[in-house]
Image: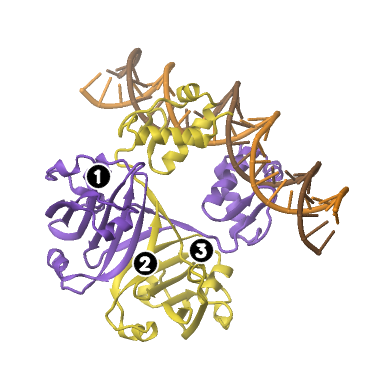
Chain colours: A yellow, B purple, C orange, D brown
DNA sequence: AATACTGTTATGTCCATACATAATAGAGTC
DNA sequence: GACTCTATTATGTATGGACATAACAGTATT
């Protein structure tokens, strides 16, 4: 019957939400709680660590554990992989590379990726389709040092997105969402009026050694980014 | 001397990124790894669990641990608290309630919060300012059952957002970002042209017992939502 | 008063062990 | 072959004990 750490977490969360432990409060220490609830300290530790990670508690050695004033909750966003997004909605995925050229990385992209000098790169612009309807249009620069072989792949089976996921190791990156009016040249691909408001994603990806790619994705009108807490 | 779980995690991540363990691969089991690295199985477990949470590994009882094909990385987004956002940028926070009325919850909002029947609620529309410049305009419905006392607060010191954070327990919710053209009545408050593209956030908040509030936030043009991995 | 040292304390982590649980693989049955 | 039952196995978790570490508080020193 012994208490699991999830039980302990639920009980602690209950006390926080029921305001038995109010924001700013110092809560009993692990040993006492373990004693009170009848489990080992390790179990309480696991439970409270989990609540701290979720933003409910603030823990500091010696200072003890206290309830956060404003529970700094964090939402998790599964990083969008366009193909998966489309397939998850039961739609047919397709893409078409509209143009592709090799050239040194331009200044704007160099700045985004913290690079300087002449960087061999390739630009690919791709339209993604869901059930034949435009889903997103991406304008991507790929650093060949961070994605060796990318320029030699015909990109007929794998989309640029999928190719990079599969062959380029990556360790960190940034995602930057904003709203913008569709530029005229993109509007044609997305099959909408120029100037319509759409979600734009600017993304940079870095591998363990080299920067890999930076991309601007124009989502089709109506796209929503959904997060749950 | 003794390996910490972070050391084990780093070593495992190194092997994944160096492709010593390739996607789809079954990696050695915990006991063997512990043996090889010279630490207890618990330590390996902690490390691998961490990598699984971060999306690098896939673990299943008996089936073992394997490297994710496409590391389903998750980005964390600190839930936006407008006042903190503004103050974090070193700007002066201010707000003004433009109008406020008590009325039963309309149909659209009832649907969003999974409610039916006649629900006592209050509507508040608020303009948020950073250094005197419009930052966001919110149109909020608050369920009085989930936020008792809200309708009696003059909202002169605390903004609706801050009031709810401080006095209404909440346990879960949804965030829904999209791009939209600013409606004419909002454009006046945000000091921009009607029809300009802006980020819109639709948010629902639920307490442990009752739904609490649903809100639509129109961010000022140029607003960016930044996530890091 | 300012500084340096020294306990004390609560959390952080490790270990060895034990048992629980989910999922697979194989044996046996129809 | 399709099904059921039964090991087997890798991960999940609980325990008690131990020590590490950060941070605070009080004491001693200058």
Q: Residue at x 55, y 50 (%)?
A: B51
Along the line of sight, the residue nearer the viewer: B220 or B130? B220
Residue topped by disc 1: B164
Does B142 sit above or below residue A177?
Answer: above
- Residue B40's label in the rendered image is none
Q: Residue at x 35, y 28 (%)?
A: A26
Along the line of sight, the residue nearer the viewer: B157 or A14? A14
Does A197 sit above or below residue B111?
Answer: below
Badge 3 or badge 2: first in the primary sequence: 3
The percent position of residue D12, horizontal first and vertical second, equals 60, 42
Pinpoint the chain carrying mark 3: A
The percent position of residue A181, horizontal first and vertical second, equals 28, 77
Instruction: Say if labels 3 and 2 share a chain.
Output: yes
Residue topped by disc 2: A224
Q: Residue at x 66, y 47 (%)?
A: B61
> Label 1's element?
helix
Instruction: Say if labels 1 and 2 share a chain.
Output: no
Q: Are marks 1 and 2 in contact (CB under 8 Å)?
A: no
The percent position of residue B114, horizontal first and vertical second, equals 35, 54
């Amino acid at each position: 019957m012994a208490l699991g750490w999830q039980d302990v977490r639920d009980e602690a969360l209950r006390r926080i939400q029921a305001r038995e432990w109010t924001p700013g409060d110092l809560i009993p220490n692990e040993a006492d709680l373990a004693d009170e609830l009848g489990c080992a300290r390790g179990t309480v530790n696991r439970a409270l660590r989990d609540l701290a990670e979720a933003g409910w508690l603030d823990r500091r050695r010696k200072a003890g554990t206290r309830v956060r004033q404003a529970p700094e909750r964090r939402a998790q966003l599964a990083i969008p992989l366009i193909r998966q997004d489309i397939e998850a909605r039961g739609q047919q995925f397709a893409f078409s590379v509209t143009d592709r050229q090799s050239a040194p990385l331009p200044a704007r992209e160099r700045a985004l990726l913290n690079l300087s000098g002449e960087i061999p790169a390739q630009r690919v612009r791709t339209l993604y389709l869901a059930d034949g309807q435009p889903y997103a249009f991406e304008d991507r620069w790929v650093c060949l040092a961070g994605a060796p072989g990318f320029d030699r792949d015909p990109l007929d089976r794998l989309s640029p997105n999928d190719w990079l996921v599969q062959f380029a190791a990556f360790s960190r990156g940034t995602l930057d969402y904003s709203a913008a009016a569709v530029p005229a040249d993109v509007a044609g691909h997305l099959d909408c009026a120029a100037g319509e408001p759409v979600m734009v994603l600017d993304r940079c990806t870095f591998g363990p050694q080299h920067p890999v790619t930076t991309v601007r994705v124009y989502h089709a009108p109506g796209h929503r980014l959904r997060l749950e807490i």
